[in-house]
Image (tube, coloured by chain):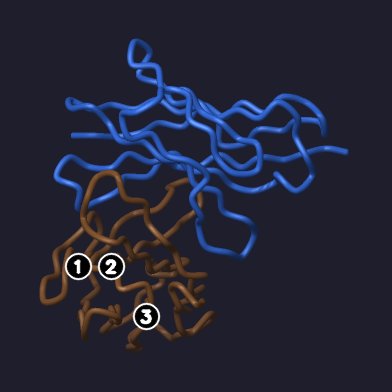
Amino acid sequence: AQSVTQLGSHVSVSEGALVLLRCNYSSSVPPYLFWYVQYPNQGLQLLLKYTSAATLVKGINGFEAEFKKSETSFHLTKPSAHMSDAAEYFCAVSEYGGFKTIFGAGTRLFVKA
Amino acid sequence: NAGVTQTPKFQVLKTGQSMTLQCAQDMNHNSMYWYRQDPGMGLRLIYYSASEGTTDKGEVPNGYNVSRLNKREFSLRLESAAPSQTSVYFCASRPNPDRATEAFFGQGTRLTVV
């Protein structure tokens, strides 16, 4: 069965600092991986996705993620945090067969002024 | 461009009451989903409809039923609400059940069962 694990339910960074949100996956087949962001009182929206093309994927709002097969990881980074990045971030894997998406527990990002 | 629309946005129910959560999408997507979101547990799939005319159970289907009314609409029904169903419910759609396609989410329904 496929799964994702997000390390750290809460991450706090200072404005201008590097953002690193960790995601590890488990999959017996080549995975299709996603990062979603959820702003307060809103639904989730796609940040970026990996679908077996380039291993470094660029998304919206300056975020990017690197697929590392050897480490079974898909960590999300942003060089310089902005106050508007404060939100909850979810890593997800698309199930083999394509019908379902499996989500991690989420990481809430706090940005300090 | 509405995307995925859920109604209502907020609801308070008494234990044992029933209600239906409505979801509609205007993107001509084939697949639709209902998730619940609870603190520390991410999103858990309740039911999904891979295409019009089909529905299947997800990870946590007990206490819920669904109807895929047509291609646009996918409703979730709680027949006898319980406090354990207090949660935020999200409807989502995808163009098709392909691994590479992302989900588009509604704004959510915040349900409290007292």
- Residues flagged by tags 3 and 1 on a common chain: yes
Q: Residues within 10 Å of mark 1 (few under 14, many from 20)?
A: many
Kind of residue sitting beneath label 2: Met
Q: Which mark is residue B24?
A: 3
Q: Residue at x 35, y 88 (%)?
A: B19
Say what secondary structure mark 1 lies in.
strand
Q: Chain of mark 1?
A: B
Q: Residue at x 81, y 31 (%)?
A: A14
> Is A36 located above or below residue B67 in the figure?
above
In 3D space, how far apart are the residues under numbered discs 2 and 3 (Cα atoms)?
Answer: 9 Å
Of callouts 1 and 2, the N-terminal one: 2
**Location of residue A52 by image quarter:** top left
Residue located beneath label 2 in the image: B32
The residue identified by callout 1 is B49
The quadrant holding residue B17 is bottom left
Judge left or right: residue A47 versus residue B98: right
Marks 1,2: beta carbons within 8 A: yes
Rendered colour, chain B = brown
- Kind of residue at disc 1: Ser
